Image (cartoon, rainbow, N blue to C red):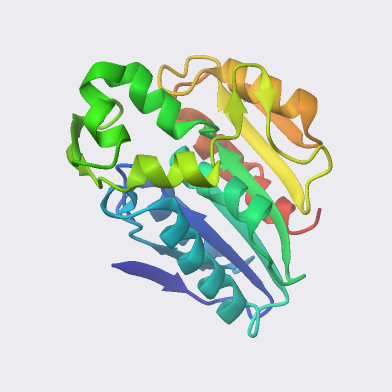
């Protein structure tokens, strides 16, 4: 399933939802409504089904989408929630993209999805999955949804080096290829806010720290009212 609204011929916001989320999420609904009510940007989101595939395949899909949309829009901004932000950051690290892509918005971003999964479920439970031999069956901590994570998912991350934060090391250019906006809540129990503090100390970015949890429900409404997403197109 996908959402595409095109009230603006110049500007497009592409949003990537979180790991166990979908285009039915509150953020997608609110961004769609903002797009339609203000006409400040067109909007696209689609079900990514991250757990059924690999990060490399998702990056290839995103690359094709951006190349295609760049033929129609002069100004594109990427937005990603949690694991969606992880995908956005790796796209900026490893893929070539048109100059039409101007900025990226990272909401409660994951910088080390694989490490967070191992920490949550234990290395012993994940052992066979880490070797690429079996799918990993989990209950996603933020949504409670039961998932089977593809057996290639972990091996792909390890072999390609997609983890951005390892310990105190940040594997990302100090000067990013596009402007970065990072929003993280101090009450986040899924991705530690310390990760964004470390990342934004090492990487040039606009950092907004708020009193909120991983979902950023209260903060997201405020960001919309204050014109945060429209402002990202202005730099």
- 54 and 185: which one is in front? 54
**Res 25 seen here:** yes
- 234 and 60: which one is in front? 60
User: Hey, which quadrant is residue 32 in on the image?
Assistant: bottom left
The residue that appears at 68% across and 23% down in the rendered structure is 169
Q: Residue 209's spot in the image, x, y percent? A: 64, 23
Q: Residue 215's spot in the image, x, y percent? A: 42, 31
Q: Is residue 9 above or below residue 185?
A: below
- 46 and 167: which one is in front? 167
Q: Is residue 57 above or below residue 158?
A: below
The residue that appears at 65% across and 60% down in the rendered structure is 77
Q: Residue 39's spot in the image, x, y percent? A: 59, 69
**Res 81 seen here:** no
Left or right for 72, reference 35: right
The residue that appears at 26% across and 53% down in the rendered structure is 52
The residue that appears at 65% across and 78% down in the rendered structure is 70
Left or right for 159, reference 92: left
Q: Residue 193's spot in the image, x, y percent? A: 57, 19
Query: How many marks do you count on the picture?
Result: 0
């Amino acid at each position: 399933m996908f959402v595409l609204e095109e009230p603006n011929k110049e500007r497009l916001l592409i949003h990537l939802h979180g790991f166990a989320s979908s285009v039915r999420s509150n953020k997608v609904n609110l961004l769609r409504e903002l797009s339609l009510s203000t006409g400040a940007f067109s909007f696209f989101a689609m079900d990514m089904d991250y757990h059924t595939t690999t990060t490399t395949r998702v990056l290839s899909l995103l690359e094709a989408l951006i190349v295609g949309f760049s033929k129609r829009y002069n100004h594109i901004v990427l937005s990603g929630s949690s694991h969606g932000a992880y995908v956005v950051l790796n796209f900026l690290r490893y893929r070539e993209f048109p100059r039409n892509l101007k900025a990226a918005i990272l909401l409660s971003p994951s910088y080390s999805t694989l490490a967070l999964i191992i920490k949550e479920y234990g290395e012993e439970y994940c052992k066979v999955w880490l070797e690429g031999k079996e799918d990993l069956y989990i209950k996603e901590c933020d949504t409670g949804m039961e998932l089977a994570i593809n057996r290639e998912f972990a091996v792909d991350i390890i072999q390609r080096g997609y983890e951005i934060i390892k310990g105190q090391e940040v594997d990302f250019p100090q000067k990013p290829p596009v402007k970065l906006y990072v929003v993280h809540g101090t009450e986040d129990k899924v991705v530690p806010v310390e990760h964004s503090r470390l990342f934004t100390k090492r990487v040039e970015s606009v950092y907004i720290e708020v009193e909120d949890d991983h979902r950023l429900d209260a903060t997201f409404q405020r960001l919309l009212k204050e014109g945060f997403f429209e402002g990202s197109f202005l730099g």
